[in-house]
Image: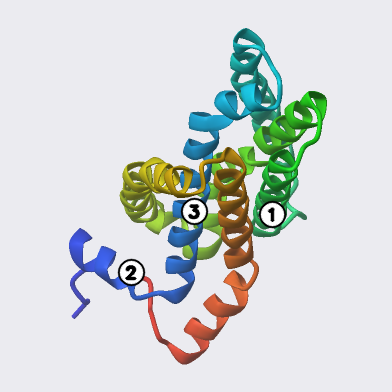
Amino acid sequence: MSKAKPTILALGLMMLKSPAFMLLLVSGYLSLMATLIVFTYAAQFAMRKGLDPNSATLVLSIIGISNTLGRAACGAISCLPQLDMNIVSWVTILLSGVSIIIAAFAYSKVHYVVACALFGFNLASFNVLRALVFVELFGLENLTNCFGLNMLFQSLSAFSGTPLANVILLYTGGFQAVFLFTGSALLLSGALLIPLKPVLKWERRHKKVTFP
């Protein structure tokens, strides 16, 4: 007699017991939080760097254009089966964190704009490659559940990210602290993905979580 398939709710709760899956969810939470904070404060920080209001607004467009180019690049490399998409993800997220920290200490308008452009380009992997990582690690049959839980964590990120940045701005009085916090969050987000496969292997070896 075959076992009954678990319900969607039971499967979701089962996946939340997976340390590897939780690493992915927390990493996604931090990445989206950082993205929203940068888009909220990039133009204001640019004016502190000496750009006029019109030029400062263009920084957002530059981030968007570089992010579009980054998505195209991620789409191209995703066709290369020899590449590990998880490695590409954490390397690019770490680079985006470094870019924002550089932007925080940028001593000229050009350096600030270039750093923001690099942030937008590297963070493209967060959106484009996440589905591939889900499938690669947890199987195509679990993609829907992975995405649903991922969206839940990202909605929490959208609610908490900007208010947290406002608190930092209120107590420090400068955008530099906000960008340093954002860059640190991205560095942590990328670092959480580094042990992902070893943790998943450990789970399967010890049968901590069994995905259907």
* Residue 21 percent coordinates (x, y): 44, 67
Mark 2 in CB contact with mark 1 (< 8 angstroms):
no
Of tags 2 and 1, which is closer to the observer?
1
- Of callouts 2 and 1, the N-terminal one: 2
Residue 170 appearing in the image: yes
Residue at mark 2 to residue at mark 1: CA–CA distance: 25 Å
Earlier sequence position, callout 3 versus callout 2: 2
Q: Residue 126 at what x, y percent from top left?
A: 57, 45
Identified by mark 3, the residue type is Leu
Identify the image quadrant of residue 170. top left
| Circles 3, 2 touching at the beta carbon (< 8 Å) | no
Task: Please determine whether, in this image, residue 56 is positioned above or below residue 103.
Answer: above
- Asked whether 149 or 110 is in front, the reply is 110
Residue pointed to by mark 1: 94
Q: Which corner quadrant holds the C terminus?
A: bottom left
The amino acid type, in three-letter code, at marker 2 is: Leu
Query: Which numbered disc, 3 or 1, marks the residue that appears first in the sequence?
Result: 3
Q: Judge left or right: residue 150 versus residue 11.
A: right
Please state which of residues 75 and 52 is positioned toward the viewer in this rendering.
52
Q: Residue 115 vs residue 145: left or right? A: right
> Where is residue 9 drawn, in percent x and y?
19, 62
Pointer 3 local density, CA inside 10 Å: few below 14, some 14–19, many at least 20: many
Please tell me the numbered disc located at residue 30: 3
Marks 3 and 2 sit apart, C-alpha to C-alpha, by 17 Å
| Residue 209 as seen in the image, left or right of residue 120 | left
Which residue is under mark 2? 16
SS at mark 3 in the image = helix
Q: Secondary structure at mark 1?
A: helix
Q: Nearer the viewer, mark 3 or mark 2?
A: 3
Q: Residue at x 49, y 38 (%)?
A: 37
Name the residue located 75 percent from the left edge and 44 percent from the top edge.
Answer: 102
